[in-house]
């Protein structure tokens, strides 16, 4: 007889997925690559199908990065606001791709722009999650000098997410760059303090400290591995867990 037992419950019921803007470039060197955006949307859908409530934060580095702008002589706050606007463009692209998969999605911006997305209101955003809508938080925290890593950790805390998933090009945290060093060692588990002390580049220091203070585990995994996001929620896959140890 076929196994009639229900599928196992996912490890987490509400999660934050943080991805970089560069993840949307695909093989291009700049901008948005629609097939890559669609592929990421399919990964998100596979987790949404498990009943998991999903928040997302997407960086803007594929379009404009505030730090690069300020390094070229632009005033830092202005450059950061331009970077925030880039994240709104990425969020709208991801919303379009998710809704093409049949997933109801809301883009919620820390900078009000009512014609294209909702303003950030915490209780309304939580209600969207409860209604099983994917909520994409755009425009960072709405403040210059804060990265989208910090925005993702802040929103994860505000939304009551149980974990932060950081999708990257590698399958975890390594002691050195695995692309340059074949002998790089991957950590199965590592503490927040070890990440900070080793300057391991998981997220910026403010984001790591905020996650540590609020006990939010950070799961670093590869976005390039098909089914990787869903696999981790089912208790499988390759990743690094950053926690208090």
Image (tube, grey):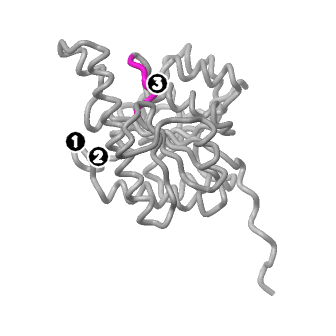
Q: Which residue is mark 3?
A: 201
Disc 2 from disc 3: Cα separation: 21 Å
Q: In this rendering, which labeled residue sits more in front, label 1 or label 3? A: 1
Relative height, residue 242 to residue 24 (above, below): above
Q: How packed is label 1: few (under 14 Cα within 10 Å), some, or many (20 or more)?
A: some
Residue ID for mark 2 = 25
Q: CA distance from mark 1 to mark 2?
A: 6 Å
Instruction: Give the residue furthest to the front.
Output: 114
- What residue do we see at 26% from left, 50% from top? 27
Q: Nearer the viewer, residue 235 or 73?
A: 73
Q: Nearer the viewer, residue 235 or 22?
A: 22
For numbered disc 1, what is the local secondary structure? loop
Identified at 47% across, 37% down, the residue is 119
Disc on the earlier residue, 1 or 2: 2
| Distance CA(mark 1)–CA(mark 3) | 22 Å
**In terms of image quadrants, where is residue 186?**
top right
* Residue under label 1: 30
Main secondary structure of the magenta stretch? loop
Density class for disc 2 (Cα within 10 Å; few <14, some 14-19, many ≥20) is: many
Is 43 contained in the magenta span?
A: no
Above or below, 106 relative to 79:
below
Residue 20, percent from left and from top = 40, 38
Tell me if 12 is positioned left or right of 36 in this view.
right
Question: The magenta stretch spans which residues?
Answer: 139-144
Q: Residue at x 51, y 62 (%)?
A: 103
Determine whether label 1 and label 2 are within 8 Å by CB. yes
Left or right, 82 with respect to 221, comes to left
């Amino acid at each position: 007889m076929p196994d009639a037992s229900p599928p196992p419950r996912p490890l987490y019921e509400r999660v934050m997925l943080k991805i970089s803007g560069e993840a949307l470039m695909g093989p291009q060197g700049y901008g948005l690559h629609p097939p890559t955006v669609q592929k990421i949307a399919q990964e998100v859908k596979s987790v949404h199908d498990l009943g998991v409530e999903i928040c997302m934060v997407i960086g803007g580095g594929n379009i404009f990065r505030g730090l690069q702008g300020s390094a070229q002589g632009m005033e830092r706050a202005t450059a950061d606001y331009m970077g925030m606007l880039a994240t709104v463009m990425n969020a709208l692209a991801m919303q379009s791709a998710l809704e093409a998969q049949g997933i109801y999605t809301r883009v919620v911006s820390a900078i009000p722009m009512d014609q294209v997305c909702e303003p950030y209101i915490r209780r309304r955003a939580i209600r969207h999650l409860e209604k099983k809508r994917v909520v994409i938080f755009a425009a960072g925290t709405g403040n210059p000098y804060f990265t989208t890593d910090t925005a993702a950790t802040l929103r994860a805390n505000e939304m009551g997410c149980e974990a932060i998933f950081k999708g990257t090009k590698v399958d975890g945290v390594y002691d050195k760059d695995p692309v340059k060093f074949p002998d790089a060692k991957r950590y199965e588990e590592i503490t927040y303090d070890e990440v900070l002390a080793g300057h391991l580049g998981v997220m910026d220091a403010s984001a790591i400290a905020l996650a540590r203070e609020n006990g939010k585990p950070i799961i670093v995994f590869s976005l390039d591995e098909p089914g990787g996001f869903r696999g981790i929620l089912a208790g499988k896959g390759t990743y690094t867990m950053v926690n208090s140890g």
